[in-house]
Image: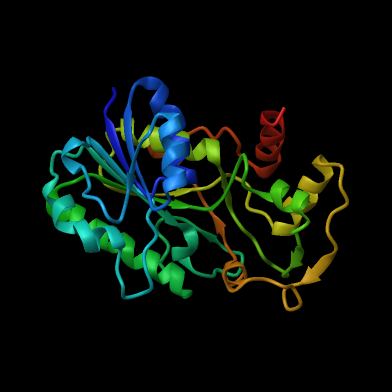
Amino acid sequence: MTGTLLSLGHGYSARALEDRLLPQGWTIIGTTRNPDKAKAMAARGVTPLIWPGSPLPLAQATHLLTSVAPGAPGAGDPVLAAHGHEVAAATHLQWVGYLSTVGVYGDRQGGWVDETATLDAKTPRSVARRDAEAAWQRLCDRAGLRLHIFRLAGIYGPGRGPFEKLRSGRAQMVIKPGQYFSRIHYDDIGQALELAIRSDQPSRIWNLCDDAPAPPQDVLRHASQLLCMDPPPEVSIDEAEMSPMARSFYADSKRVRNDRIKRDLGLKLMHPDYQTGLAAILRSEG
C-alpha cells in the first residue's frame, strides 16, 4: 500500500513517519513556515509547501496528518480555521491523523491515566489541545472521515533529548517530589503512525508512550552516566531558572498507560523504556 500523505506542520514527529513511508514509494507533501526547512525537506524527498500562505492540495492527498499546534484557548485550531470546510469536503481521504498531547489529562499527582480518563487540562496550552481534539473529532464525524488522535508523551530521539542538554551545559537536575513524566521515542512514533495508517481501526484515540514513566532527574542522571559525565547539581523546582513554558510542564505529574494502542494496533515498542531508548540514540551516533 502506498499513497500521498499531506503532512501539516511537518516537524520532528512527522519526520519519524516520513522515514518509514518514503522508502516504500509514498509521496509526502509537507508544510512548513520556514524556507530553510522547506529546502531541507526537499533534499530528503519531501515535497515542501510554505503554509500558511498557500492552498492545501487536499485533492492530491490520500492521507492527512496534522501536527499543527492550536492557538490560544478560544482561538481554535489554525488548520480548521483556515481550511475546515475544505477538509470536511475531502471525503476521499482514507485516513486523518491528529498529533495531540497527554497534557490534556491535566495533573494527576503521579497517578495513572488511560484513554478513558477525564480531560482535566488546566494550563492554557493543554486546554487548547483538548479543544482542538474535540473540533477535529466533530468535523471528521460529520464528514465520515476516519480520525486517529494520538496523545503523545514527552518526545525524545536523535538530536532531541537529554544528551543535547548535557553536552550544551543547559541541563538542570530539577527536583520536584512526586514528579513523573511519560516519554516516547522517535522510532516508536513512526511505527505507531504507520501501523495506524495500515490498520482497519475506526476513529480512535490512543496514548503514545513507553512502558516506564519516570522522574525527570532519573533520566538525566542515566544519560549523564552514558556520556561519562557528572550529572548537573540538583536544584529544587522553586529555585530552578526555567522559561514559563518549561515550568508549565512541571505543573502536571502523571503516569500514562499504553495498553489500548498495543491491543488495537499490535504495537511492540522498539524502546519500551528510556534506558533502551537512550542507548539506541548513542548507537546511532556511531
* Residue 229 as seen in the image, left or right of residue 22: right
Position of the C terminus by quadrant: top right
Which residue is at a point 60% across and 36% down the rendered structure image? Answer: 271
Q: Nearer the viewer, residue 94 or 45?
A: 45
Residue 204, given in percent of the width and then of the height, sits at: 31, 48
**Can the viewer see residue 8?**
yes
Q: Nearer the viewer, residue 249 or 252?
A: 249
Which residue is at a point 38% across and 69% down the rendered structure image? Answer: 128
- Location of residue 133 (image quadrant): bottom left
Which residue is at a point 19% across and 43% down the rendered structure image? Answer: 58
* Residue 4 as seen in the image, left or right of residue 206: left
**Can the viewer see residue 259?**
no
Residue 143, given in percent of the width and then of the height, sits at: 13, 51
Question: Is 265 drawn above or below residue 127 in the view shown?
Answer: above
Question: Is 169 drawn above or below residue 243 in the view shown?
Answer: above
Which residue is at a point 38% across and 33% down the rendered structure image? Answer: 46
Residue 88, given in percent of the width and then of the height, sits at: 15, 52
* Residue 189 as seen in the image, left or right of residue 48: right
Color style of the picture: rainbow
Question: Is 39 drawn above or below residue 147 in the view shown?
Answer: above
Residue 149, given in percent of the width and then of the height, sits at: 35, 50
Position of the N terminus by quadrant: top left
* Residue 248 as seen in the image, left or right of residue 51: right
Give the number of marks: 0
